[in-house]
Image: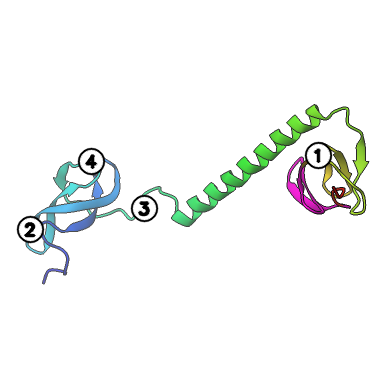
Amino acid sequence: MARSGTAVGKEALAYCTSCKMDLNHVIVAMKGDLIARVQCRTCKKDHAYKAPKGVSEPTEKPEKKAKAAKKAAEAEIDHSIQAEWQKLMVAHKNAPLKPYGAKSHFVLGDKINHPTFGHGIVNRLIYPNKIEIIFEHDMKVLIHAGSAQV
Ligand SMILES: [Zn+2]
């Protein structure tokens, strides 16, 4: 008795003699219960059926790919921050280095020396008492004494 799904026009996994790997094929001809001829979905060639060799296609698992893409994206962000940081450090190379302190007052373009994050540049003032600082490897929002009241 034929297995369900094994019939002319149905798909079956077979070894493709052209692609040299197990691929999905469309069954073209049957010989009794056995698949006689198949057409490769990849190269569209007709050939005698050959049982799959059990060697899976060399494709990465989707989640692995997603992880790699995420890692690449993170590296990209890190790279752009570093590039921005270098640009800012050059632009403000003559600015005095101020030690970071939550009670100190900072303005745009101030060069900050932070005990954990290293040297950074104030890139944005966030009202009323926060500053966005670009450090070599990260962007941080830190508290400071606040903008002077106008
Ligand atoms: Zn093929």
The residue lying toward the viewer, choosing from 127 and 137, is 127
**Which circle marks residue 118 in the picture?**
none
- Which residue appears at 85% of the width and 38% of the height? 110
Please state the extent of the stretch shown in magenta in the rendering.
124-145
- Distance between mark 1 and mark 3 Cα atoms: 57 Å
Q: Depth-wise, is mark 1 or mark 2 nearer the camera?
A: 1
- Distance between mark 1 and mark 2 Cα atoms: 80 Å
What amino acid type is highlighted by mark number 2?
Lys
Q: Earlier along the polypeptide chain: callout 4 or callout 2?
A: 2
Task: Please tell me whether mark 1 sits on a helix, a strand or a loop.
Answer: loop
Taking the magenta stretch, the answer to whether it contains residue 120 is no
**Which circle marks residue 108 in the picture?**
1
What amino acid type is highlighted by mark number 3?
Ser
Q: Is there CB contact under 8 Å for labels 4 and 2?
A: no
x, y percent for residue 73: 57, 45
Q: Depth-wise, is mark 4 or mark 2 nearer the camera?
A: 4
- Distance between mark 4 and mark 2 Cα atoms: 23 Å
Left/right of residue 133 with respect to residue 20 in the rendered view: right
Left/right of residue 138 with respect to residue 8 in the rendered view: right
Q: Depth-wise, is mark 1 or mark 3 nearer the camera?
A: 1
The residue where tag 4 is placed is 43
- Distance between mark 4 and mark 3 Cα atoms: 17 Å
- For the stretch drawn in magenta, the main secondary structure is strand
Q: Earlier along the polypeptide chain: callout 3 or callout 2?
A: 2
As drawn, 4 above or below 49: below
The residue lying toward the viewer, choosing from 80 and 38, is 80
For the residue carrying disc 3, how many other residues have a C-alpha within 10 Å: few (<14), some (14-19), or many (20+)? few
Q: Is mark 1 within 8 Å of ligand 1?
A: no
The residue where tag 3 is placed is 56
Q: Is mark 4 within 8 Å of ligand 1?
A: yes
- Which residue appears at 36% of the width and 53% of the height? 56
